[in-house]
Image (cartoon, rainbow, N blue to C red):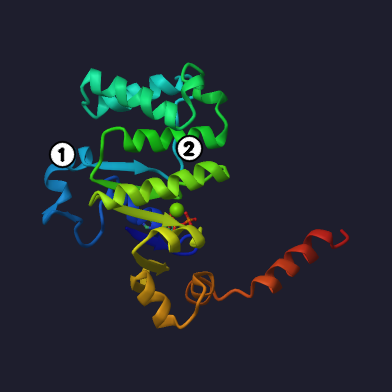
Amino acid sequence: MLGYLGPNGSGKSTTVKMLTGLLQPTRGQVLFEGRDIQSDLVSYRKRLGYVPEAANLYPLLTGQEYLEMVGTFRAMSLAQMKSKISSLLELFSLFAHRHVSLGSYSKGMRQRILLIAALMDNPDVLILDEPLSGLDVTSVLIFKNLIQAFSALGKGVFYCSHILEVVEKVCSQLLILRSGHVIAYGSTEDVRRRIGQSSLERIFLELGEDADVVKVANEIVDVVVAPS
Ligand SMILES: Nc1ncnc2c1ncn2[C@@H]1O[C@H](COP(=O)(O)OP(=O)(O)OP(=O)(O)O)[C@@H](O)[C@H]1O
Ligand SMILES: [Mg+2]
């Protein structure tokens, strides 16, 4: 379970787009089980579950219709698809909303639909780009436990986030990125030990951002309240 951290614009989502084959790297290759993913993108993607940073869900489809569309694209058998969808809708507390259009779902409900879409075909690798966006406390707790159980099955998780508190708790490896460059990489304990700080929040601030947060915040307020 790799936690992929970095400030805004550091290249997390760009990495994810290359890992999922949506973007061609200008240099280098993405290898999966020793093979370039471009050699058979369809079979490779069948093994992935992907929660994108910003998904354009079809607002006129119901939750159930959207998941059936995903299952069809993934060439799941009809019986398998139907049973996974109804069980997962139930477990993600969306069963009662399954015939409601996605356009009227709340932010957290849409995020839960994306998680189901990523999980329903039993992927070997989960790629998550800010997966907790908009989730409430209960959903976050379920999610944290869920990805730990998923990883205990020997599956891979690539987890992009700013929420250090979560990443620190669930990931075995950490990578910190700044301006497209890796500035720290290793086991969660190693990264923390190397930096010599107890809080990952501090490591992130020191390695990832030089900004004096209090000063910047005060300057923003000064500008906002300044008389015109
Ligand atoms: N194909 C590309 N070629 C060159 N630059 C790109 C390309 N795609 C994205 N970028 C740039 O790379 C930078 C990193 O963007 P990216 O979306 O990966 O950041 P991020 O780490 O996910 O940030 P956030 O935390 O805001 O989600 C941005 O400045 C973006 O404009
Ligand atoms: Mg991003």
Type of residue at label 2? Gln
Q: Is residue 215 visible?
A: yes
Q: Earlier in the sequence, mark 2 or mark 1?
A: 1
- On the image, the x and y values in percent for residue 84 come to 31, 26
Q: Quadrant of residue 88?
A: top left
- On the image, the x and y values in percent for residue 205 come to 53, 72
Between 99 and 70, the residue placed more toward the observer is 99
Q: Is residue 101 above or below residue 200?
A: above
Residue at numbered disc 2: 111
Label 2 neighbourhood size at 10 Å, few (<14), some (14-19), many (20+)?
many
Residue at x 19% of width, y 58% of height: 29
Q: From this viewpoint, which residue is outermost toward the right?
A: 227
- Alpha carbon distance from label 2 to label 1: 25 Å
Residue at numbered disc 1: 43
- On the image, the x and y values in percent for residue 34 come to 11, 56
Q: Is residue 183 visible?
A: no
- On the image, the x and y values in percent for residue 131 come to 45, 46
> In the figure, is residue 103 to the left or right of 63?
right
Instruction: Check the picture and name the quadrant holding the N terminus.
Output: bottom left
Residue at x 51% of width, y 41% of height: 139
In the drawing, what numbered circle is on residue 217?
none
Instruction: Check the picture and name the quadrant holding the C terminus.
Output: bottom right
Q: Is residue 44 above or below residue 2?
A: above
Residue at x 33% of width, y 56% of height: 15
